[in-house]
Image (spheres, rainbow, N blue to C red):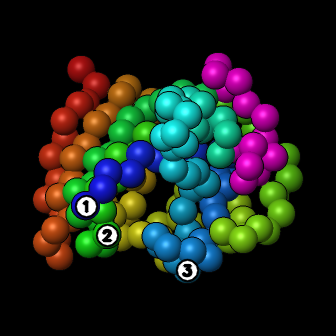
Amino acid sequence: MHLKLSCLLFIKRKDGKILLLKRNKSPNKGLWSPPGGKFDLSSGESPFECAKREALEETGLILEDNDLRIFGYVSEKNYQNSGHWLMFLFECRKFIENTPKCFDEGSFAFFNRLEIDSLSIPPTDHEFVWPFYDKKELGFWGLRADCSESTPKIKIEASPS
């Protein structure tokens, strides 16, 4: 299996609602997820470069490095029996004003944090992406999940001291 490098962007409006994408494509087709995407490995893209490019491509939001704060990573082994993922999690410090237009990957909507818990989101996001998002102010988090079994085995590799 191949390792895929990606980023997820947690972008808010001024009212605090978080932007999510209902995906039209795999992985996670039909589920809600923060915008983001895979690194351009051919150009040697860094996590920040990937986050800025994906924000622009998917939402039209132009970001600088200081508009982003990386608060963790999630390493998923054997995700959906299709590969390994290393996802960098970014809080966007710049607000978005409007709902981005639908595009081939899906459509966007805003939700408050409590609404997200009742949405159709990837099961592993319920287990470890959103709980670590909720603790992002405490510091940097790193998480390893082996998704080979029906119940992922989770290990915290880095946590705030």
Query: Percent x, y for residue 115?
Result: 57, 66
Instruction: Mark 2 and mark 1 in contact? Answer it, CB < 8 Å.
Output: yes
Q: Residue at x 22, y 57 (%)?
A: 77
Q: Residue at x 36, y 39 (%)?
A: 73
Callout 2 secondary element: loop
Magenta-drawn stretch, dominant element (helix, strand or loop): helix
Callout 3 secondary element: loop
The one of 46 and 33 positioned closer to us in this rendering: 46
* Mark 2 or mark 3, whichever is nearer to me: 2
Crowding at mark 1 (Cα within 10 Å: few <14, some 14-19, many 20+): few
Q: Which residue is mark 1?
A: 1
Distance from label 2 to label 3 (Cα)? 17 Å
Instruction: Mark 3 and mark 1 in contact? Answer it, CB < 8 Å.
Output: no
- Horizontally, is 41 left or right of 25 in the view? left
Q: Which residue is mark 2?
A: 82
Callout 1 secondary element: loop
Q: On residue 30, which mark appears?
A: 3
Distance from label 3 to label 1 (Cα)? 24 Å
